[in-house]
Image (spheres, rainbow, N blue to C red):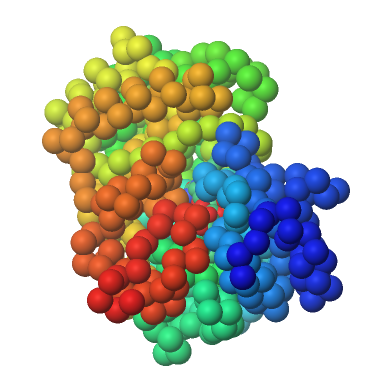
Amino acid sequence: MTDAIEDLRTTADELARRVAGAVLLPGDEGYAEECATYNPAVPNNPAVVVGAAGPSDVQAALAYAKDHDLAVAVMNTGHTTVVAAGRTLLITTRRMDEVTIDPDARRARVGAGVRWQQVVDAAAEHGLAPLNGSSPLVGVVGYTLGGGLSATMGRKHGWASDHVTALDIVTADGQLRHADADVEPELFWAVRGSKSNLGVVTAMEFELFPVTRLTGGVLIFPGDQAGAVLRAYAALTAQAPDELTTSIAFMRLPDVPVFPEPLRGTFTVHVRVSFLGAAADADTLLAPLRAAAPIMIDTVGDMPYTDFAAIYSDPEGPAPFAERTLSLPPLTDDLVARLIAAIGPAADVPANIIELRHLGGALRDTPDGAGAAGLRTAEFVLWVVTVGGPDLTGPALRWTGELFDGLKPWALEGKHLNFIGQEDLAEEAVRAAYPAAVYGRLARAKAVYDPANVFHLNHNIRPAAAVA
Ligand SMILES: Cc1cc2nc3c(=O)[nH]c(=O)nc-3n(C[C@H](O)[C@H](O)[C@H](O)COP(=O)(O)OP(=O)(O)OC[C@H]3O[C@@H](n4cnc5c(N)ncnc54)[C@H](O)[C@@H]3O)c2cc1C
């Protein structure tokens, strides 16, 4: 049945009676809050939003979407830029917020609405820690289904998606399925790299690691020292042990309140450090970097793992922003020279944050049972972020395109799925985000689990024609 958006209200009342969570339409009290994202630059105005409290709510929402011919989007925190507008049904997962830790098995089981700080705090009570990212507010499931590049332990333990041990998912046909290495293994592989392309994950189980403290923090240098700092950073990352996970960010921060006072309106270079070892050993590793240029702020030291958010101090948001990403090899002299020319103090740069996250180490490995995500051949992920409305992000995105054109001689296959922006959602760009064989296999899984492409409000993988 296809009906006009305004006619949905009658049938939505019936849906609301079957749903334990919330069913809201435009104009309803709470609709705007339910649809709110971390990135308000992306309009999120679905015809219906279902705040799912559990798998049966997700199933009811999918049945309703099918009956009314609505495309389906999935959201927890809204850190990714996905537009749900017009004839769409948005499923929000925040109500599924339970966390259980099994200290003997060193595993966590989380509902789809859980954010990282919740897991870090719960795991810490047992002397354990997960492969979380830089931000305490990012959602565990969305992050992990995109690979999950841990800002604290990525190089030591690899991609978070490779450490998932089981998940529950409602696929497009409305079935609640359990997937692990033995049950539905192809679904288990494909979900860990296709995000919401195959269905809505309602719960996920993953490994934890016996870590309670780390040596972490940030070194902040003045922007006019960018060349010296990047050269020292290239030397550091060329020799780094797997215990050291770092990134370097060239920050031209606008004078807006989401950024801290001393850094607003300035150009600075930040090296973010997480070391799984003693502070003295970190000092030895960091000595050449510390000597490379005058330091404005140095917070690197021993800290409880639960304080990981202090390493990046990511904005709590919400703030409108645009992002793009590219994968790069080691920082050879020619690449460093190209980067300094393009983003150093002499360059006219409209983007706010240009960040290189160091991969390598265990992130290169393909362990038994690995998922579809994971940039295993790149050494760095380049992430370019600009904060603001279209007047600011438009010129910045044009500039980013030119930056990426200039980096073509170095650019590598694949993209970190968690940093893909609106500009890279077209079919060819999504295809290019994966190695060709991985995309082909994902397209075959899509044809099995979502042949009608109900879940296309994402970085969309088209169902393979042969299987469909
Ligand atoms: C400040 C900041 C810091 C970040 N740091 C890191 C980092 O250190 N490492 C890293 O790898 N990434 C990082 N990211 C990127 C982040 O991992 C992605 O934006 C991720 O998609 C966020 O997931 P979410 O659930 O919070 O966001 P949402 O926008 O709610 O979800 C993102 C997407 O994930 C999918 N999804 C979410 N929940 C489900 C579900 N239950 N079932 C199926 N699909 C689902 C959907 O496709 C959805 O569009 C960062 C982003 C920001 C803005």
- In this rendering, is residue 448 above or below 405? below
In which quadrant will I find the N terminus? Answer: bottom right
In the rendered structure, the answer to whether residue 208 lies left or right of residue 194 reads right
Seen in the picture, residue 389 relative to 112 is either above or below; the reply is above
Q: Is residue 233 visible?
A: yes
Q: Is residue 290 left or right of residue 377?
A: right
Give above or below for 55 relative to 41.
below
Q: Which corner quadrant of the image does residue 169 belong to?
A: bottom right
Q: As drawn, is 350 to the left or to the right of 91? A: left
For the point 38% across and 17% down, the residue is 349
Position of residue 466 measured from the top left corner of the image (x, y, whole percent): 25, 76
Q: Dividing the image into 4 quarters, which one contains the C terminus? A: bottom left
Q: Position of residue 160 (x, y in %)?
A: 45, 63
Residue in the picture at 73% in, 60% down: 8
Image location of residue 3, percent across then percent down: 65, 61
Give the residue drawn at x 60%, y 47%.
85
Residue 285 shows in this picture? no
* Rendered position, 335 above or below 216: above
Given the current orientation, which residue lies at the most extreme top position? 346
Q: Looking at the picture, tell me which residue is in the foreground, 287 or 271.
A: 271
Number of numbered discs on residues: 0
- Give the x, y percent position of residue 395: 41, 20
